[in-house]
Image (spheres, rainbow, N blue to C red):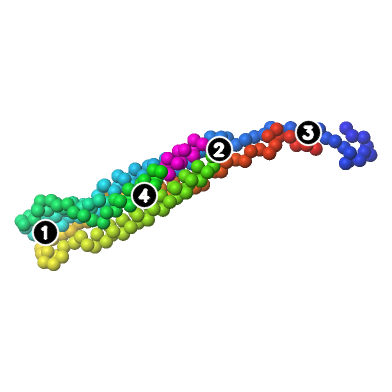
Amino acid sequence: MTELGANPEQQSFSPVRYPAFAPPQGRRHRPALIGALLCAVAAVLVLVGSFVPLFLGKVQGPGGLVMTMSITGWDFHVDASGTSLPTSRNGAVPTNGVPLALGATVLLAAALLGFIAASRPSHAPSRRLAGVVAVAGAAFVAGTVSTVALQVISWFDSFRPTGLLATAPNTSADVSVGFGLWLLVGAAAGAVVAAVFAWVAPRDVAPLENPDGVIAG
């Protein structure tokens, strides 16, 4: 205790020690790891979706005419039955598979960088690079999928009987969205979520300025 009347400026206090707490180490890696996993899943969905039919159409006409068409990101296939019509035919369409494959490659690169960043918590530049690549891949895939979706909508209007076939009796057309487009939409959504996780991955926690927890009086 200090004496009464002593100058407060001359009073001294013993240091009070408090335990220094550091944030849990494992939690810092979780966003980067989740982003990397989502990028990998989105890349696989993009690649699979490019080979699965994006559009399916079927036309039935007089005389037992039946024609079916399926369009993927790489080609189209037509099956037809009836007189003077080939049994099947393959052809070319806008090759959306090329930009889709490119987008999947960027997402795979982002996934690899994300796994590296998650395993190196003290290396902030690797997490920033993973975030930038993930955002670029997500934007590219989302833009490409939007273009493919617009093409599918146009195919709905194009795939219908025309000319004499349109006025013939017992003629009908049935069109539907292929499962491949839904895979691409899911991949684009997953890529956007992955980019968010990769971009907001927490920065390294600054070292404690007072690791001993000492507060001097």
Number of marks in picture: 4
User: Magenta stretch?
Assistant: 110-122
Q: Is residue 214 shown left or right of residue 202?
A: right
Q: Which residue is the site of mark 4?
A: 103
| Residue located at (41% from left, 53% from top) | 139
Q: Which residue is mark 1?
A: 61
Report the front residue among 9 and 94: 94
Can residue 38 be seen in the rendering of this structure? Answer: no
Residue 116 shows up from this direction = yes
Other residues around mark 2 within 10 Å, as few (<14) / some (14–19) / many (≥20): few
Q: CA distance from mark 1 to mark 2?
A: 68 Å
The quadrant of the rendering that contains the N terminus is: top right
Q: Which of the two labelled residues, at mark 2 and mark 3, occupies the earlier sequence position?
A: 3
Please report whichever mark, 1 or 4, sits nearer to the chain's N-terminal start. 1
Q: Which label sits on residue 186?
A: none
Q: Earlier in the sequence, mark 2 or mark 4?
A: 4
Cα distance between the residues tagged 2 and 4: 29 Å
Q: Which residue is mark 2?
A: 122
Asked if the residue under mark 2 is in contact with the one under mark 1, i.e. CB atoms within 8 Å, the reply is no
Q: Given contact means CB atoms under 8 Å apart, are the residues at marks 2 and 3 in contact?
A: no
Percent across and percent down for residue 74 are 25, 51
**Which residue is at 26% across, 47% downward?**
52
Disc 3 marks which residue? 15
Q: Secondary structure at mark 2?
A: loop
